[in-house]
Amino acid sequence: MKGVRVMVGTRKGAFILTSDAKRAHWDVSGPHFPGWEIYHINASPVDPDRLYASQSSGWFGQLIQRSNDGGQTWVPVGNQFNYEGDPGTHQTFDGTQQPWAFKRVWCLEPSLTDRDTVYAGVEDAALFRSTDGGQTWLELPGLRAAKGHLWQPGAGGMCLHTILLDPANPQRIFVAISAAGAFRSDDGGQTWHPINQGLISPYELPDATAEVGHCVHNIAMHPNRPGVLFMQKHWDVMRTDNAGDSWQEVSGNLPSDFGFPIAVHTHEPDTIYVIPIKSDSEHYPPEGKLRVYRSRTGGNEWEALTKGLPQSDCYVNVLRSALAVDSLDTCGVYFGTTGGQVYASADSGDSWIPIVRDLPAVMSVEVQTLS
Amino acid sequence: MIHVLLPHHLQVLAQVGREVELEIEGVATLNSILNALESSYPVLNGTIRDQVTLQRRPFLRFFACGQDFSLAEPDTILPEEVLSGAKPFRIVGAMAGG
């Protein structure tokens, strides 16, 4: 029987929510790793029982956990993330240079073809790869060569938070870094170049159209159309139709084009979702109304999705990795809030229910569709 | 036999109780205790000190016999009561809220 597994990372542990294909009733498992920050949990598309989790703590540092049974049991694997060679320095808030230093793993992206290969995006921003199921990690240092000395932390840290693997081209990888921008490799991660042409950041950068330095919050693609990417930038929702060579703004009629996550409908490559936040100074929904916005036209024209979501006195945030979709016939959409709610829609966003509502602050949501 | 007290999260990771016992060959220094601990429980590698620099993680403290050894040099020899097992060596998470 088909079903869905929702993997939720929170400030105080991981939770796994499961349901059948109707997505009406949910079982909650957790907390796993209680008391630890779980920045991300993700599953191998090759082996749905293989999960990876990033477990970290201000006291005890970074661990990586691996499950071979869909999250019922976990084993710690390798946690040594050493930059290749002398990593040099990057910019800081005050414009001075600071040595690169590993802090934590923000995201884990399993390979599309091998369950033992997984990528890790870390802070200070770099990309690592393991080919032995997370036991050992090697940096792909060519990324930092893409003007890394000009990157600087966003408020959340200088983090590589998004990794997209191109299903049509195994050599092509996209990453996004706050606050550096988006980058692309066409040779399996050996060399990289910035793909930020068209991004405009007049409030954040001295040169609004700089090649690097933009605070990209999230990027998303549809697997059947990997040359089209959508981006939620610090301000502005953007789109590229040429794999990042140039971007156009598609914020259109959004009530605010500030936000964190962005996602693409599983079956409709031009249907995209964002969750507007009032501003960079006030990280909660405009007017206290929690609204998902959907565009069925690849941007510019947006409709508010409100049924089942709080429409008054709501002041939660939705972080960059906390929005995901399933691949059932009617696409399910899921997001988690800093207030600890996880909302689900089984009808592409038309209506929503809270499938759990009192978790710690949600940092990430990923979804597996199980056959 | 040296007795080491671990904070809760490290007990869970190492799948041990609050106290572990370590045999140290030669002189028991701060460094040799941590080396023995990590050798006995490899999952703790990187959780107490950086794996490359061996620097103590900033929010962890080392206490023994009413003294704070957090800032002590790695080759500091610990008090006789610790070496004899009469008093424990304590690894403590620094106080913080939230």
Image (tube, grey):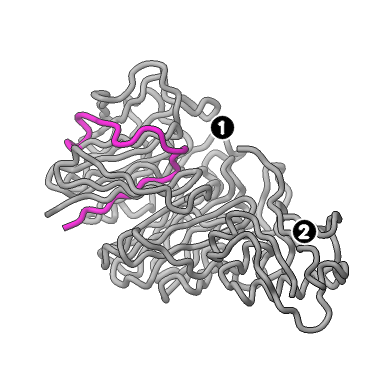
Q: Is residue A359 above or below residue A86?
A: above
Circle 1 residues within 10 Å: few <14, some 14–19, many ≥20: few
What amino acid type should be assigned to the residue bearing mark 1? Tyr
| Residue in the foreground of this view, choosing between B51 and A209 | B51
What secondary structure is found at the residue carrying circle 1?
loop
| Residue in the foreground of this view, choosing between A9 and A274 | A9
Write down the quadrant of residue B1 in the picture. Answer: bottom right
Most extreme residue toward the front is B86
**Side of A147 relative to B68 (left or right):** left
Q: For residue A203, which numbered disc appears in the image?
A: 1
x, y (%) of residue A333?
A: 25, 40
Which chain's residue wears label 1?
Answer: A
Write down the quadrant of residue B19 in the picture. Answer: bottom right
* Region in magenta: A346-371
Residue A182: in sight, yes or no?
A: no
Quadrant of image for the C terminus of chain A: bottom left
x, y (%) of residue A293?
A: 30, 30
x, y (%) of residue A190?
A: 47, 71
